[in-house]
Image (cartoon, grey):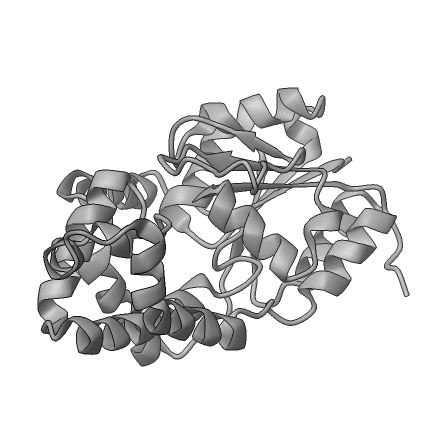
Amino acid sequence: MIKLLITDLDDTLYSWIDFFIPAFYGMLDELSSILNKPQNVLVEEYKQIHQEKGSVEYPFATLLLPSVKDAYPNRTKDELLDILNPAFHKFNSIRKHRLKLYPNVKETLEKLSSMEIRIVGYTDSAEENGFYRLKKLEISDYFKRVYVSDSQFERPTSLPSSTKTQIVHGRKPNPELINTICKHENVAINETIYLGDSMTKDIYMAKMAGVTSVLCKYPRDTKIQEDLYSKLVAISHWTKSDFQKEITIKEVCRKENIQPDYIIQSFEELLAIIQSLNNTSPLA
């Protein structure tokens, strides 16, 4: 009997890479004009900051760029925000246009909630990014809790943490965190289903933890995705050891024939899987 759904957020409920990379590079183009600096120079500076902060989404990383500090050495934070506002505006406008749920995500979450399935999120993103997106997409109410990663960002008092978020230490894949989440939610491993888009981060972790695993394999334009991914790598916080770890896990999955229990190509297929496991009739 499935009682708990643990779901990844980015690229599982919505396409993170499809909004973030266009928004980031739109901001980069604007920033390059403001500073009169080549984009490739700024890309390298961003990458260094992202690696120092452990996130490609560290808030106001732009203010820490050497090029920004050199151009405006005596400006206050508020003055810098005002000067660089066109770049931030470009990011926000592109994000607003491109951040969208995958088809039928909201409807499926609503139906699962009506079946009294507890829904929690588990993401490598920090609260100021991952949970923020759930609120913007108007689906945060369906989540009992969202487990988020540590952040070096000091939240201002005007932006308090949500009572729904819980910080967990350590990034995916960490099977022990799945066990921790199940214990915290007072649900057994065999009553839990895990949903994610990454074989090496999500499915490998779920299989090692012993929960039923579902891999999201949505139809995508391969060429567009490869281009977006290469742009992500150029600014990413990922280190050589991160890439090596992923290669190692891929090899383990291949050698041990680790596979997801289910594969879905559209989010609403999750509903039929849970109904089947629970031997319940489909909802109208």
- What residue is at 21 percent from the left and 44 percent from the top? 51
The answer to whether residue 159 is above or below residue 29 is above
Tell me residue 237's x, y (percent). Answer: 24, 47
- In the drawing, does residue 228 fall left or right of residue 215? left
Q: Which of 222 and 24 is in front in this view?
A: 24
Which image quarter is the N terminus in? top right
Tell me residue 175's x, y (percent). Answer: 45, 28
- In the drawing, does residue 55 fall left or right of residue 189? left
Quarter residue 269 falls in = bottom right
Q: Can residue 238 be seen in this view?
A: no
- What residue is at 62 percent from the left and 60 percent from the top? 136
- What residue is at 57 percent from the left and 41 percent from the top? 158
- In the drawing, does residue 53 fall left or right of residue 15? left
Q: Nearer the viewer, residue 37 or 77?
A: 77
- What residue is at 21 percent from the left and 74 percent from the top? 34
Q: How many labels does the image show?
A: 0
Tell me residue 252's x, y (percent). Answer: 29, 38
- In the drawing, does residue 245 fall left or right of residue 37? right
The answer to whether residue 110 is above or below residue 143 is below
Tell me residue 264's x, y (percent). Answer: 58, 61
Which image quarter is the C terminus in? bottom right
Q: Is residue 164 visible?
A: yes
